[in-house]
Amino acid sequence: MKEVIRIENLSKSFGDLQVLKNINLTIEEGEVVSCIGASGSGKSTLLRCLNVLETHDSGTIYFEGKNINSKDLNINKYRSNVGMIFQSFNLFSNKTVLENCTIGPIKVRHVDKNVAVEDALHFLDKVGMLDFKDADVRQLSGGQKQRVAIARALCMKPRLLLLDEPTSSLDPETVGEVLQVIKDLAKEGYTMFVVTHEMAFAKDISDRILFVDDGVILEEGTPHEIFENPQKERTQQFLSRFINM
């Protein structure tokens, strides 16, 4: 399989607090890797480093073999290949659903407007939001906004999708609809790195699960290995109410 991301000895501090400590990780094409752990363990910081929303202190991140911190990297082109789905949606509130989905391809990828609209309609249909294409995003529910955010990311035809706790801002009734959309993308072979607190969801969609604790990948393995036979005491403690679920 083709390697999409390789992280070597990645470290990151905020002041005196070291948040990531010598992280090493590879993500291959078509692989879904979920990152779990307690709040403050470093999960979201790791994800944000992958999209260069945070600058790491040391170590190297390679995207398809290229160092993303090299001087000649086009950051906008890189980000167009790495779709980011935020906790808080980050939609343009002054634009319609359809405009939110077409602006990136037109402005960044220089896609013809008619092609961008055709793609956007396709992806809005995929996430169940086609009927809302002309809606004001401010009128949407949280679950609807997140599905639009997913469609918007897909419109950029990304090589990698980063999902930062995509259901944490949603009410319980809409969590399921967003998780189903993400499950469907996993089945279609999208490469994904997901930070989540939804354990059943992580177990269901992941090829591999990372348990991050105090800035290190303490344990990694298949969902079966992590949830049914965790090796580390700290992993067992964290997952005690989920084991054998």
Image (spheres, rainbow, N blue to C red):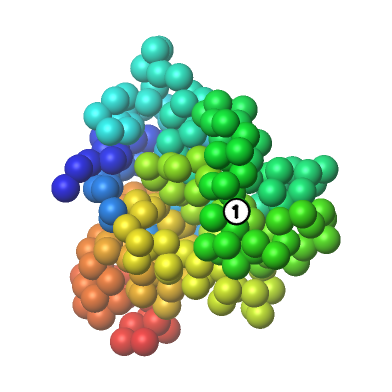
113 above or below 196? above
What's under tag 1, amino acid-wise? Leu
- Nearer to us in this view, 178 or 220: 178
| Residue drawn at (36%, 74%) of the image | 204
- Nearer to us in this view, 40 or 209: 209
Q: In the image, residue 242 lies at what x, y percent?
A: 39, 82
- Nearer to us in this view, 82 or 241: 82
Q: In the image, residue 244 lies at what x, y percent?
A: 31, 87
Q: State the residue lying farthest toward the bottom.
A: 245
> In the displayed structure, does residue 123 sit left or right of residue 9?
right
> In the displayed structure, does residue 225 sit left or right of residue 40?
left
| One can see residue 95 in this view | yes
Name the quadrant of the C terminus.
bottom left
Q: State the residue lying farthest toward the left.
A: 1
| Residue drawn at (65%, 62%) of the image | 130
72 above or below 79? above
Residue under pointer 1: 121
| Residue drawn at (71%, 52%) of the image | 97
Q: State the residue lying farthest toward the top.
A: 71
Circle 1 crowding by C-alpha within 10 Å: few under 14, some 14–19, many from 20? many
135 above or below 10? below
Q: In the image, residue 166 lies at what x, y percent?
A: 56, 60
